[in-house]
Image (cartoon, rainbow, N blue to C red):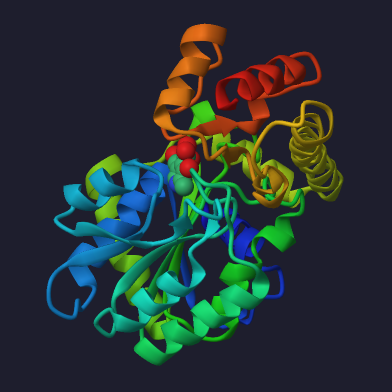
Amino acid sequence: MGASRRQEAAKLILGADSPAIAEGRVSSVQTISGTGANHLGALFLSRFYHFNGEKKAHISDPTWINHFAIFRNVGIEAVTYPYYDPQTIGLAFHPLLDTLDTLPDRSAILLHACAHNPTGVDPTREQWGQICDVFLKKGHYAFFDCAYQGFASGDLDNDAWAVREFVRRNVPLLVCQSFAKNAGLYGERVGALHVVAPSKEAADRVKSQLSVLARSEISNPPAHGARIVSLILNNLDLFEEWKRDIKTMAGRIIQMRDELHKLLTEELKTPGNWDHIVNQIGMFSFTGISPEKSQALTEKAHIYLTQNGRISMAGLNSHNIRYFAENLDKVVR
Ligand code: PLP
């Protein structure tokens, strides 16, 4: 991505009217998709962040499993903070808030911008606001991982809300951006790392260091997928079409959630509460079933899900949803 392309990508996540961009406070580099953005962000912190004590990054329990290795590779220990409450199959909000409050000042904390992987559980706007309060009080650094912009609600701006709110309130942060899912460019490995600095001078210094790091590791990022993204972002008709496509994809997943919920609660009267299916967001859903039951689904019905009970909502469609619901019903009974 050239400079203007990188800025278009920054606008997509930070907002077209972002004062941080207008003030030249955002340093952006193209990365090897979201994974590369996480790596470069972690490497950047490992080299330049003034850790308060030990080099630790705080990540949600659970999280995308690769986060552990990504931080370990750059000499940062990844430790977890409470996030998911198996009792409610929802957010462990107070334990999360209390933990952030008791961490050393200026801790580096990874947050999923939207559509949390693997739980599908996101904070509400009000909860984000309270999380932001703690970041400001403690001077924490926010390491936003945004792999699913648009996939949560079907709306790119809506899904970027938390990131933009943290930028608006001047929390020091970086954002890892992926185009793998929302632009269907998984194999092209298109992503970006955006570091929001307190001033243009600081951003220029950050940019220079990021360029050195990226050059030593990948020399230059792949061009083809980035050109496709750039084409979409710079052509109003294509951009509008892409937004409609995202809405269709996210809408289909939301519809599958509704149908699955209806089948379980109204038709099959499956024991237990299944409201989390509709309350969760994005392409994954934590069903709340045990590893044994997950295994039984795989062995008895050839339904493949992770041992922790996570299903890919995108894998459900009008042809297989009843089969899934009926087998889920069987294993939990
Ligand atoms: N971050 C999270 C939370 C993810 O779920 C994923 C993909 O599974 C990634 C980052 C990596 O995305 P990419 O395929 O763009 O490297």
- The residue that appears at 46% across and 82% down in the rendered structure is 171
Task: Indicate whether 14 appears above or below 281.
Answer: below
Residue 315, by quadrant, is top right
- The residue that appears at 59% across and 80% down in the rendered structure is 129
**Which quadrant of the rendered structure holds the C terminus?**
top right
Task: Indicate whether 92 appears above or below 105.
Answer: above
Q: Is residue 240 left or right of residue 40?
A: right
Most extreme residue toward the bottom, as rendered? 137
Front residue (pair 293, 145)? 293
Front residue (pair 243, 226)? 243
Task: Indicate whether 261 appears above or below 275.
Answer: above
Residue 141, by quadrant, is bottom left
Tell me if residue 170 can be seen.
Answer: yes
Q: Looking at the picture, how far across and down is residue 123, in whole percent?
A: 59, 65
Q: Looking at the picture, how far across and down is residue 251, in whole percent?
A: 81, 40
Front residue (pair 78, 213)? 78
Q: Looking at the picture, how far across and down is residue 307, in whole percent?
A: 41, 28
Q: Is residue 67 left or right of residue 221?
A: left
- The residue that appears at 79% across and 14% down in the rendered structure is 319
